[in-house]
Image: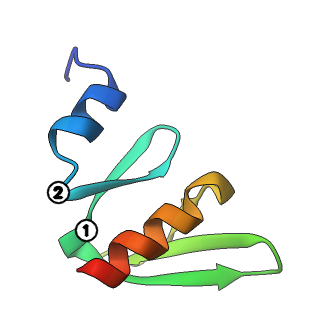
Amino acid sequence: MLDEPLKQLEEEFAHDFVRAHRSVLVAIAHVEALERVGEDNYSLRLRGEPEPLAVSRRQVAELRRRLQQS
């Protein structure tokens, strides 16, 4: 458990993590793929995880940009 707000953690670890959803930060190194699910929905496929992680529509553009940089 952490007492720091997620926004603060996001800023502190911005080089290694990216926000996928309002309450989710993801380590960029563990992202296998950003997948389109349906017309307007996306999910992240993470290494070693069988279930995809839902991505907020608001975060898709930033996720794409950060994944292209890595």
Residue 38 visible to an observer of this rendering: yes
> Residue 14 location, x and y as percent?
22, 49
**Label 2 crowd (10 A; few <14 / some 14-19 / many >=20):** few
Residue bearing the label numbered 1: 28
> What crowding class fits label 1: few (fewer than 14 Cα within 10 Å), some (14-19), or many (20 or more)?
some
Viewer-nearest residue: 66 or 56: 66
The answer to whether any part of residue 47 appears in the image is: no
Residue 5, placed above or below residue 53: above
The quadrant in which residue 45 appears is: bottom left
Residue 13 image position (x, y, % from top left): 16, 45
Image quarter of the N terminus = top left
Picture coordinates of residue 49, whole percent (x, y)? 33, 74
- The residue indicated by pointer 2 is 15
Three-letter amino acid code of the residue under disc 1 = Ile
Query: What x and y, as percent, mark residue 2?
Result: 19, 22
Checking the image for residue 45, the label placed there is none
Q: Say which residue appears at 17% left-offset and 57% top-offset.
A: 15
Residue pictured at 35% horizontal, 77% vertical: 67
Instruction: State the CA–CA distance, disc 1 to disc 2.
Output: 9 Å
How many circles with numbers are drawn on the protein? Answer: 2
- Secondary structure at badge 2 equals loop
Look at the numbered disc 1 and give the secondary structure of its residue: helix
Quadrant containing the C terminus in the rendered view: bottom left
The mark lying in front, picked from 1 and 2, is 2
Whether 24 is drawn above or below 30: the answer is above
Q: Amino acid at mark 2?
A: His
